[in-house]
Amino acid sequence: AFEKGLVSGLKKSFPEMKNFASQAFNIPPNHLSLMPSEQDKILNVVPDRILALGPVGKEMAVQFLPEVPVDFSPAFRYQKILSTPVAVNREANNILVLFGYGLENALTTIRILIKLENQLSSFKQVLLKLHPGGYFDRARLLQELGQPLPPNFEFISGRLEDYLDTVALGVCGATGTAVELATRGIPVVMIAETHSLTMNYLAARKEPELWELCFTSDDVASAVKRFHGAFLNDREKLIRKGQQFKQAYFVAPDEKYWKNYLPQDRKEPLYV
């Protein structure tokens, strides 16, 4: 629904059609986000309604488009991970690295972690997961890296929730999945961009016990030590913080939000 050309074409060809903008994934709160701009209002490509995943998304929508009706949407792709119970597993001892879209940030991230190999020796494995929307694969990343990975660094694939009970710390680039870790009380080290604006998906809620933005290897080493200690010593507190984070980013499931995709004068779907 944020594809401006599509919105423009629909408005011209079907003037009676109502266009809803649904927040299908988390977005960072900055001026390069997907929120429509003032120019979009002039060009008449602003949606008729915006449906956000939670209070954070709604706040951003209201800030940029105060005249457009805003309500909530079902969680869609996040439904599974949000419904998966959070286990107080103190045996969890892996680092989960979630790369962002960009190759440069991924290289920065992995080089910092290799540099800190000795400081990470208390962790069992460093699990590496590529972003599904990234333009590079494992082979390209390793080729550009130009050095072998430590033996406990392992690439993984598949569903994120299959690994979460083994994870004590997340290290993330520009990926909205960082929000999913935080909602489960898993501390997140965000690796800042060195070549462009950092797309920090967690910035809408300051929570120093759950996430920190790091620019250098020293920053990362300090954050890893602090977060790992918190994970080992007060896991329950982190889970409570994660619940608060989840309530900010995702509205509680409710059947009524499905009806937000219907025209205001229609109470039942056209097809079932």
Image (cartoon, rainbow, N blue to C red):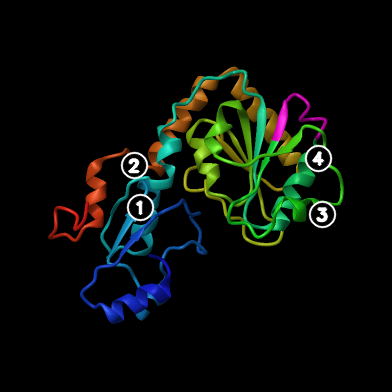
Which residue is the site of mark 2?
A: 251
Q: Are marks 1 and 4 in contact (CB under 8 Å)?
A: no
Q: Amino acid at mark 2?
A: Val
Q: Earlier in the sequence, mark 2 or mark 4?
A: 4
Residue drawn at (62%, 23%) of the image: 92
> Quick one: label 2 or label 1, which is nearer the N terminus?
1
Q: Which of 234 and 263 lies nearest the eye of the viewer?
A: 263
Which label number is shown at residue 143?
Answer: 3
Residue 263 position by quadrant: bottom left
Find the distance from the CA under tag 2 to the CA under tag 3. 42 Å
Point out the image quarter for the N terminus.
bottom left
Q: CA distance from mark 4 to mark 3?
A: 15 Å
- Kindly identify which residue carries mark 4: 114
- In this rendered view, identify the residue nearer to me: 83 or 39: 83
Percent x, y of residue 222: 71, 34
Q: Amino acid at mark 1?
A: Ala
For marks 2 and 3 on the same chain, the one whose residue lies earlier in the sequence: 3
Could you tell me residue 77's position as x and y percent? 43, 46
Residue depicted at x 76% and y 30%: 120
Counting every numbered tag in the picture gives 4
- Depth check, mark 3 against mark 1: the one in front is 3
Count residues near mark 4 (Cα–Cα under 10 Å), then give few for <14, some for 14-19, many for 20+: some
Label 3: how many residues lie within 10 Å, few (<14), some (14-19) or many (20+)? few
- Identify the image quadrant of residue 12: bottom left
Q: CA distance from mark 2 to mark 4?
A: 38 Å
Q: Earlier in the sequence, mark 3 or mark 1?
A: 1
**Structural distance between the alpha carbons of marks 1 and 4:** 38 Å
Q: Amino acid at mark 4?
A: Ile
